[in-house]
Image: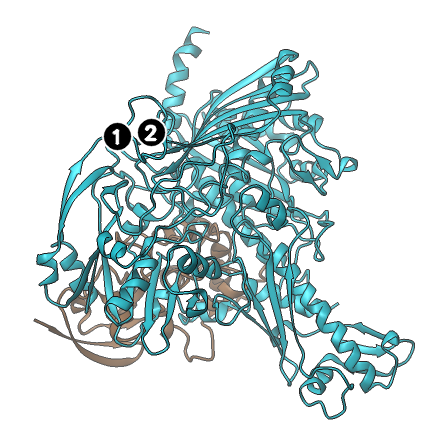
Chain colours: A brown, B cyan
Amino acid sequence: MAVSVSLNVNGKSVSREVEPRTLLVEFLREELGLTGTHVGCDTSQCGACVVHVDGKSVKACTMLAAQANGTSVLTIEGLAPNPEDLHPMQAAFRDNHGLQCGFCTPGMIMSAVDLLQHNADPSEQEVREWLEGNICRCTGYHNIVKAVLDAAGRMRGQPQAAE
Amino acid sequence: MADDGIGASITRKEDRRFLVGRGTYTDDINRPHQTYAAFVRSPHAHAGIRGIDTSAAESAPGVLAVLTGKDLADDGIGDLICGWLIHSRDGEPMKVGEYAVLAKDTVRFVGHHVAVVVAETLAEARDAAELVEVDYDVRPACIATATATANGQPQVHPEAPNNRAFDWELGDKAATDAAFENAHHVTKIDIVNNRLIPNAMEPRAAIGEYDFGTEDYTLYTTSQNPHVARLVLTAFVGIGAEHNMRVIAPDVGGGFGSKINIYPEETVCLWASKKVSRPVKWTGDRSESFMADTHGRDHVTTAELALDADGKMLGLRVHTFANIGAHLALFGSVTPTYLHGTLFSGQYVLPAIYVNLEAVYTHTAPVDAYRGAGRPETAYIVERIAEVAARELGMDSAEFRRRNFIQPDQFPYQTPVALTYDSGDYPAILDRALAMSDYDTFPQRRAESEAKGKLRGIGLSCYIEACGIAPSAVIGSLGAGVGLWESAKIRFNATGNVLVYTGAHSHGQGHETTFAQIISSHLGIPADHVEIVHGDTEKTPMGMGTYGSRSLAVGGSAIVKAAEKIVAKGTKIAAHLLEASEADIEFKDGAFTVAGTDRSTTIQEVAFAAYVPHNYPEDLEPGLEESAFYDPGNFTYPAGTHICEVEIDPDTGVVEIVNFTAVDDFGTVVNPMIVEGQVHGGIAQGVGQAMMENCVYDDDGALITGSYMDYCMPRAQDFPGFKVATTETPCPHNPLGVKGCGEAGAIAAPPAVMNAITDAIGTDMQMPATPLRVWQALQAKAPAMAAE
């Protein structure tokens, strides 16, 4: 028994027949080949799978593909306006060495972008608290926090030096 | 000097693909017609297997095969191995129990691999795995480290009476006992180094693929050391032969030691791919990682330090039980021995040391290297006992350490536990860290905290580590099954850009950037024109992989050696092009110049001439490609001082790290930005061990901390920003002067944090210092305070 799912992913309409138990993250990775969204745990803790659904950050391992029917989904692959460029958050992660192995990075970036949608000028403490649902094992978060603050400055039109 | 060479904080070349979601991790790879594997795992820590009924699973939808240990045996597939042979102090070789790919007649830990289902889809494989009926004869389990050798404990392996794998010693027992007889004061502590689960964010995964046409195997796997995996899987486990096996470790999402071991899952995927004539893919979920990845640490120690009347260290005596779990994993025996016992001199003149370590089997997951691998356990003992000693003697912690430091003019320094430290300036590191942490004004901050009802403490950790384990002949004499050299191949293209093939493997360390910086400095090729190739046995020369902070010191040195060969050949070509004598050619900043003239040719022009050899020296081979293998003359010895300052709420036991300072001597620094990032990450893992992380099994061997709901991983809000700096005493024996930085934070941080917390609460306690435990420690101390 399959269910029909139609949604917009990174600006393109897609329709698929999937098993009802298909998770949104499985749909993105296996059906659409968008493997930038990662699976790092099985308890909705690590945040490697964060995408935006209708503009809000969501853990794609905690939502069925069927629940995303009719929504607009944005993944890390669609974040930058075109494939040649980097979104300011991606550029800030690069410039501040906010990634090492890169596995948590897409979820971390998608979560951080949503933070700035809520709060364009967060304090360091607010960044640290917002990222509670994203685990990184490599960076000690130091440079991730620096990158998010840097991106916030860039997106407000006030480029900050990377220290 | 090139602005993208050694010493420059250039941004990372590898970042772009990760930032835009185009990295290629093993689970991102799908092979045509692939099938999916799901493992049946033991729910019991210890049980006999009376029988396995696979019939229901075999007839389930989509199932292609249900395989057990018997099928492995029928195909002649052997057991997995430990790579280092340790001898006990009585001369006996270590007792090695069975490490079967799929359990034979006994399961030995929760999560132990019993059977595998291969099916058309992952869902079908998992559904069918639920239908495999295993008839278990459940037996009592041996779990606790400290009591594993006691009489009457359940036995893990018949080969190892009293669960003792080996009883190892290092140092001079008689001299150490004598030091204690002459001591003015003896400090004694009991220490538990808590068991950890590495938790690289990418779970392990594998795709095995057998080609009946070429009779070749291909393995895609999450490995830190693909060549070692190929060697073990072919030569020891018996799947194919080395020349018929290609191992690809693509982008790997962190390792921290847990991706060194050669595991059952990748072995099964390879073997099963031939059975079902299709690629077999397995991707571990996090629960499987918790249960069956190698764990870390898990030592129970008693340590004694003998001191004279001036507070000088006279001798150190250590006894440890080290839990190695149910199997000796690949580095499971060297981690608690030669990576551990050899560092007990710390940064100190410590004339007599004796270490005795009993490695014990238990019915728990195998324990192997985890970031620092043996050295964090040593630093924790040395720096905790140093701190307790200073307190007992009423001495300032910094002054006590300073009084005992090996002095800069004492290098090379021979310790009583085998190593010869090559370089260092420990007082300079300490001074810098004290200044950066405002150590002198701590009493003022403590008073301010006390005024608002909080406790405040400060803790030092002056650690040493040893990286780049070598030379191969020495480690061979100590029991290593391999050499620990590294390889590099530099290939110039005709258009003047460069490919570098390395046997090291990057899984977050930034090799694609730092190795390119070496090429920039040594050959004058911009880092942007250099591509680093790693992680594929068919592309790169044989190499030993990445662990133990070895890649730059050993792999980077191999690149320098290959670059020297490039310059040597380029000099011959340039001499011909410039119509000069070879002896007159100088190479600098990417140009060959006739000394004392302005006649010059670039290395790119030389490369073009080498591939289009129309005007070329007679008797010289065309092409510009050179390889080198580098076997170091000694370990390297990074060292540092980390200082942690905490504030504690006595009503809740919540510890806040208010300041963390790290000053490290890594020798020459190639990319300061990347080095700082490595230090940050190491500190976070060290703080995680000290304050949050703890792997817990219950008495029956059930894994209590089997998910992120129960195993506390450090989050962003658990840390302040870190203050980090480096000092530099170059390593004298490798061509880059580098020492290694990957593990320092994880080694240094736990004692710094615990020294700070115990300073604040005024009583000793074990890791992890969770709010509950800190509160309990304060409550336990309260009656004593009331009685004072």
Horizontal side of residue B425 vs B126, given as left or right: right
Q: Residues within 10 Å of mark 2 (few under 14, many from 20)?
A: many
Is any atom of residue A115 visible in this view? yes
Look at 65% across and 17% down and name the residue there: B179
The image shows residue B293 at horizontal and vertical percentages of: 35, 49
Look at 40% across and 21% down and name the residue there: B778
Occupied quadrant, residue B780: top left
Q: What's the mark number on residue B144?
A: 2
On what subunit does the disc labeled 2 rest? B
The image shows residue B520 at horizontal and vertical percentages of: 68, 70
Closest to the observer, B645 or B47: B47
Q: Secondary structure at mark 2?
A: loop
The image shows residue B559 at horizontal and vertical percentages of: 65, 65
> Vertically, is A146 above or below B338?
below
| Pointers 1 and 2 in contact (C-beta within 8 Å) | yes
Hey, what amino acid is under mark 2?
Ala
Q: Secondary structure at mark 1?
A: loop
Hey, what amino acid is under mark 1?
Asp
Q: CA separation, marks 1 and 2?
A: 8 Å
Look at 16% across and 37% down and name the residue there: B137
> Vertically, is B66 above or below B95?
below
Considering every residue shown, the one lying at the far bottom of the view is B614
Occupied quadrant, residue B154: top left
Quickly name the residue at label 1. B699
Closest to the observer, B357 or B121: B357
